[in-house]
Image: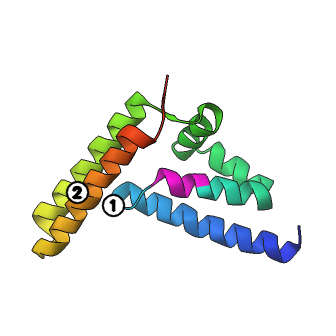
């Protein structure tokens, strides 16, 4: 793989990582898919960055669990859904003034809950 392609993958992986971290705090923006994309881009471009990502104290557990077991634990699902709805509730009650935007955020939350609950595989 050429050096230019590796640099592009590192840049894209870093953008994906930033979006994944923002997704922890911003309702409707998924975290896990961005972290998995980051891992896929880093493994193809930089062993160092990939190792730092999967060995990260907080983020690494989710990636390792998903990679090894092809799913996430029920505990992580519950935590993710609860945190997502906590952030949605704060946003809808205190931060968002527009009713149509509130409806969109709640709709995205419902979709996210359905995906997390029924599409993402639960592992023990």
The residue located at (59%, 36%) in the rendering is 70
Q: Residues within 10 Å of mark 2 (few under 14, many from 20)?
A: many
Q: Residues within 10 Å of mark 1 (few under 14, many from 20)?
A: many
Q: Picture quarter containing residue 6?
A: bottom right
Q: Which residues are magenta?
A: 31-36
**Residue 124: where, in percent of width, then height?**
49, 22
Q: Picture quarter containing residue 17?
A: bottom right
Relative to 46, is 82 above or below? above
Residue 117's label in the rendered image is: none
**Residue 15: where, in percent of width, then height?**
57, 69
**Magenta region includes residue 32:** yes
Relative to 74, is 25 above or below? below
**Residue 100: where, in percent of width, then height?**
15, 74
Mark 2 highlights which residue? Answer: 88
Kindly check if marks 1 and 2 are in contact, taking CB atoms under 8 A apart as contact: yes
The residue located at (73%, 74%) in the rendering is 8
Q: Mark 1 or mark 2: name the one nearer the start of the chain.
A: 1
Mark 1 highlights which residue? Answer: 28
Image quarter (top left, top right, bottom left or bottom right) of the N terminus: bottom right
């Amino acid at each position: 793989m050429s050096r230019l392609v590796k640099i592009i993958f590192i840049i894209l992986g870093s953008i994906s990582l930033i979006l994944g971290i923002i997704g922890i705090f911003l309702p409707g923006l998924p975290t896990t898919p961005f972290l998995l994309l980051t891992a896929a881009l880093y493994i193809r471009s930089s062993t160092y960055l990939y190792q730092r990502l999967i060995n990260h104290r907080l983020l690494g557990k989710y990636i390792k669990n998903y990679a090894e077991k092809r799913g996430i634990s029920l505990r992580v699902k519950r935590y993710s859904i609860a945190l997502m709805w906590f952030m949605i509730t704060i946003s809808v009650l205190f931060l968002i003034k527009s009713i149509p935007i509130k409806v969109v955020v709640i709709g995205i939350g419902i979709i996210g809950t359905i995906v997390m609950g029924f599409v993402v595989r639960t592992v023990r």
